[in-house]
Amino acid sequence: MLVICSWIKYEALGNVIPRTRFIVFKTPINSQLSSKLHKEQRFTTNDLFRKLAERGQHLGLVVDLTDTDRFYDKKDITGMCVEYEKVNCPGRGFTERDECVESFNQVIQDYTDKCEDQDALIGVHSTNGINRCGYLICRFLIERLGWSSHEAIDAFEQARGCSIEKGAYVMALHKAAKDSRSKRADSDSDSSERRKKKKNKRKHHDEESKNAINEVNMINMILGELGQQTASVSGYHSSPNGLNTTPDPTPQQQQHWGFAIKRSKYAQLNQPVANGTSTPPDATSESTPLDEEDYEEEEYEEIEDEVDLEPGKGQSVSSKRRARRNRMQNYMRVMQRGRFHEIQAMREEVALTHGSARD
């Protein structure tokens, strides 16, 4: 009876808390308890739905925070197609019961995630709809919506029309807000660090990709230049006097001339022709680099073939072989130096020698 006496003095139904779907009321009572009160003091589930309908409002969920089931039957709520959830909250040591806060937050979060009716209100009540309601709703606003403790408490008290009476609840809310700020700061720091690491990793990956592309482009460019220079080196044409000549190289060709010469120097000297002599290749001939020992072995075979073809020229086979070897060694030294004017002079000498031999 003492509970009913304190219950009578509180307003039955508050207003919707701004920027939320919360509406707070004191617990409705059944007809048996109401019969002990004057008609104007009664507040049943029927009175609750009637008052809401007069305001043009409707409930989607009712959260009961009382630690008893004797005030009304939950079927009075569910029978009106309204969801009902029970979170038992004892009156003593309530602020130390973190499981109550977690249960309440989860119930509210689950409902808001699945409810498509944004106008459906969330009704929360304790016995008087003041202390436990105020504490849990403010904790949700602080921890889930990021409100400050002052914002949450002021919004609740203005909507309910009554202040939270227990100072321990108010102190606990301020402490909860401070802890929540610390957690958010740590989380933001961790998130910032993760974002920074992710950004650095992405930047490093982009740099590696860019370097790889640049290397590929550079290799392709060098190969293209070497191909052009090699074609330029082997691009002979006949002059009016019968000598094999080649156009002067460009500065870019001169820069890489030695490398291009070394790629094709052996193949250019070792091209057999019908009369048994070796002449520089034409522009369409293919060249394959050989080692110096391989080149000399192949040249010896060609010299022996030539001696067999023309054995009676008045010169011994060993003399011809020594002369040919000396000539080859001289050609090799000129090609290794890679100097264009020496190579050109050597080619002219070879052309004149072959021309006089044919005559």
Image (tube, rainbow, N blue to C red):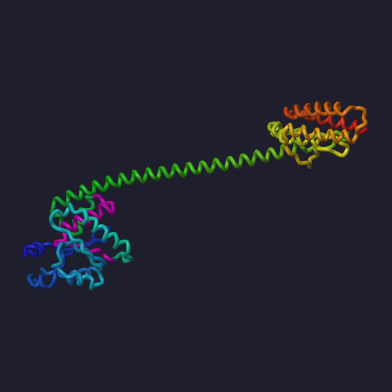
Residue 160: x percent and y percent?
Answer: 18, 59
Residue 348: x percent and y percent?
Answer: 83, 30
Magenta stretch holds residue 142: yes
Q: Quadrant of residue 238?
A: top right
Where, quadrant-wise, is the N terminus in this rendering? bottom left
Q: Nearer the viewer, residue 30 or 226?
A: 226
Does 113 sit left or right of 160 as displayed? right
Q: Nearer the viewer, residue 50 or 331?
A: 331
Magenta stretch holds residue 126: yes
Q: Residue at x 75, y 37 (%)?
A: 232
Q: Nearer the viewer, residue 252 or 223?
A: 223
Q: Is residue 29 above or below residue 305?
A: below
Can residue 238 be seen here? The reply is yes
Can residue 57 be seen here? The reply is no
Q: Nearer the viewer, residue 266 or 161?
A: 266
Q: Residue at x 85, y 27 (%)?
A: 318
Does 341 sit left or right of 276 as displayed? left
Where, quadrant-wise, is the C terminus in this rendering? top right
Residue 224: x percent and y percent?
Answer: 67, 41
Q: Is residue 69 above or below residue 257?
A: below
Residue 181: x percent and y percent?
Answer: 27, 46
- Magenta segment boundaries in residue numbering: 120-148
